[in-house]
Amino acid sequence: MPLVWPLLLSSALFGIGVYGVLARRNAVLALMGVELMLNAANLNLVAFDVWFRDVLVSGQVFTLFIIALAAAEIGLGLAIVLRLFRTYGHIDVDRLGGDPPPPAGGSEIPRNAGASWDLPTVKEREPQ
Amino acid sequence: MIGLVLVVGLPLLAALVGAAMTDRVRVALVAVGGAAITWIVTVVVAVPRLGEAAPVGGSWGHAWGNLTAPALSFALRADSMSAALLLLAATVALLVQIYSVAYLAEDERYRAYAAIVSLFAASMAAVVVADDLFVLLIGWEMMGVCSYLLIAHYSERADARDGAAKAFLMTRTADIGLLIAIIVLGQATDSYRISDILDATAAGKLSSTTITVTALLILLAAVGKSAQVPLHTWLPDAMPGPAPVSALIHSATMVAAGVYLVARMHPLFAESRTATIAVGLIAVVTMLIAAAFALAQDDLKRVLAWSTVSQLAYMFAALSVGSVVAAISHLIAHGAFKALLFLAAGAVAQAVGSTAFADMGGLRRAMPWTFWTTTLGLAALVGLVPLSGFFTKDAIIGAAYDAGQSGVGPAPVWLDQLIVAAALVTAALTAAYATRAWLLVFAGERRGSAEAYEAPALMRWPMVALTVATVFLGVAVLEPGWLGGAEAEPVHAWIAVTSTVILVVVAGLTWLLGRTGDPATRLGPLRPVLAREFGIDAAYDRIAVRPTVRAADLVLRTDSDVVDAYVRGASSGAMTASRLLRWAQNHNVQTYVTVAVLGVALAAVLAGVSAG
Amino acid sequence: MSTVEVLFWLLSVLAIGSGVLVVTTDHLVHAALWLVVTLGSLAGCYLLLTAEFVAWVQVLIYVGAVVVLLLFALMLTRAPTGADSATSTRNRPVALVAGVATTAVLGVLLVDGFRGERIDVSDEPHGAAQPLGDAIFRHWVLGFEVVSVVLLTALVGAIVLSRRSPDEPVEESATARSGPPEGSG
């Protein structure tokens, strides 16, 4: 088959993956876009390797390495997503960032207790 | 020279010192005392100058000369005309200050009032003794400012504020004429001093165009200041000011300054036939319509205001036929009896609580002093023999008649004859409105509810003093040449007889009509037309005031919509730019990656294009 | 066209179609399942290109492990099992432009460079297991070891990141954007 076909397929998948990363609101869905991009690169490598008939089979070896790295990456990435979910309560990429909401049911410690500029209350003033 | 400086400087000093006092008694002492000392100095300085005496004067400040060309200097000069006016101004100022102590006894703003009245006295003195035209202009404008402040003395009243603004704006607009005339004369004769300019005129050094133009411009300023047609509408609306203010400023001194200016610059007017005709026609129209308006008014002070306008027109008429002596004599006499009438109006107003005829009536018994002084004042106004008004009016009509008979004098013969006729008709109208006012105030049944009482002593004695002056000034002006003019026959028999007959007939007719109510109701449909003053004021409002207000609105809106739009645009531009720049830090990963991806694509394209 | 080419066309269409569905569908779980289809069709493409070992590794790792991990993540983050109302951000038009631009640049570049070339698939297959294993353990063994270390690091990192800190409440906060899971789950 013409070499160009798998190359074009990989370009198209790459573009679809880019769209997915940039346009999806849920972080897990954005990671799916990343997976599409990686697969597009894999297809490119395999196509070139088969066309070139490399003696060292370097394209397919790289593909295997990329698959392994993708697995590692997705594991870590989803661990991070989980962490975000526990901190913010959601994984909407538009709303992530800034101060996380306070933990529910925590102790009510006033925020500036003990600051040096706090004025003493009446009963703490010196007796006349 | 020292005396002249004192005459100007002492009231100024009194104003400053009085403004610094806090205790009411001290303010009154400074005001009255200052006016009294000024009066003594004025008498010492001015009396020797009356009659044929040579003028005296001096100047300082030629060193300023290098700043302007021609040179400005603080030059003062007093001849017999100035001396007469100084005496009038100082006397009326003193009497008004005394009167005001009682009239404004419960007024909280007395201190400011007294200081401004003293300041006004200084300005009037400056105008009268000025030899440098700019000194005159400064005094002229200061009088305008004092008039504005004093008309608006009762500043909580909207009609006082509006009247003050109207007076100031109309006279100030007219003063542009004076300013331009001063500059033109200065350039033409290379000096701003009046004596130099009049010498140059006499020597024929000025072109006739220059003379006519400057004379007309000076006439414009005089017309504004003296409330002649077409700038006559401000004076009746200045009546919401306190009565002593009306007496001092709007009858005896400030409005007379216009007459003084034309009289002082008379050699200019004498050389220009156009200007003379202008003066004469303005005078004729004004004297007739002002007297007619006075017939239809419902307010005592407004009647007196229109009367003032009409009498000032008499003085302008005298000037146009060439008799400065007659004009100034009438000015002095009018100053005395009109001030008296306004002070009396103040006493009546204080007694009954308003100045409307509807609240007066039958005050003859309740206010005897006021009644007798007012009667004598009104008699002088209508020209009853042997009061001062008789002699001076006779002098004016006589001068016009003589000029018409002999053809001598700056005015054409037809103008002389027109003036004689108009003066006689106005005398009739004057008799009518004066009698009507007298009847409505003092005769008949008491209308209105307030309990009328006689004026306190401090208000009565100035009125008495002015009445004495009114009676005896008549004799004084008989003295020929007291103003340094040529000897003239003091009384024309036929004029005296005619005017007295007219006076008696008209006054009697008015009295008869007055037995059955307000004589003005006999005017019928003419009355509302006259009361509206021919709608001239409304026309001015449409022609001049509203377009100006709309132009001011336009400027305001231009500033806020057009100019400010740039300012607001700068701020909104900055806000928009900051909003756009904020995207670089909006902690949204997708934004960052988008920019990176697009950047890489663009870079790849550029690399491909530039390499290929 | 030969059989291989026809099959490749079909698989391409399938891959692109399901890829588009992955990135546009509103059902989050369906997106993961469409990803399975995409990855599977890519494995088919590898087979057509005679890269057998890569194809089976793709199915094993990607479809078997990665997608399962993604589904677990969706579950743990309380993703709605029905249609979600707002799965795409405001970035959509710009993202579309970026995607199309990327595809265009790559496509033009590749077509321009490799226009007339053909892959010869009628000879012996090029990606058999034995020569591939030979190549990995002989020539690429260093990279192989490094990838192993990376996998170990990722494993340790994932454990560390997903541990709960001692004072963290066990119950997760209910402030997730999605509501409670719907019944159709």
Image: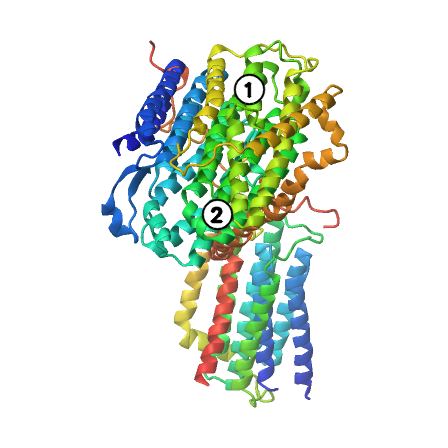
Residue B307 x %, y %: 58, 31
> Can see residue B169?
no
Asked whether B354 or B129 is in front, the reply is B129
Seen in the picture, residue B205 relative to B123 is either above or below; the reply is: below
Asked whether C103 or B220 is in front, the reply is B220
Residue B524 x %, y %: 77, 32
Label 2 SS: loop
Q: Identify which residue is drawn at 45% across, 36% down.
A: B488
**For the residue marked with disc 1, what is the amino acid?**
Leu
Asked whether A98 or B36 is in front, the reply is B36
Label 1 SS: helix
Disc number lying in front (1 or 2): 2
What residue would you read off at disc 2?
B409
Q: Residues within 10 Å of mark 1 (few under 14, many from 20)?
A: some
Q: Identify which residue is drawn at 33% across, 9% down.
A: A128
Q: Residues within 10 Å of mark 2 (few under 14, many from 20)?
A: some
Q: CA distance from mark 1 to mark 2?
A: 35 Å
Residue B512 x %, y %: 73, 21
Q: Quadrant of the N terminus of chain A?
A: bottom right
Seen in the picture, residue C132 relative to B259 is either above or below; the reply is: below
Give the chain of mark 2. B
**For the residue marked with disc 2, what is the amino acid?**
Gly
What residue would you read off at disc 1?
B376
Give the chain of mark 1. B
Where on the picture, by quarter, is residue B98?
top left
Disc 1 and disc 2 in contact, CB within 8 angstroms: no
Where on the picture, by quarter, is residue A127?
top left
Q: Left of B525 or right of it: where is C56?
A: left
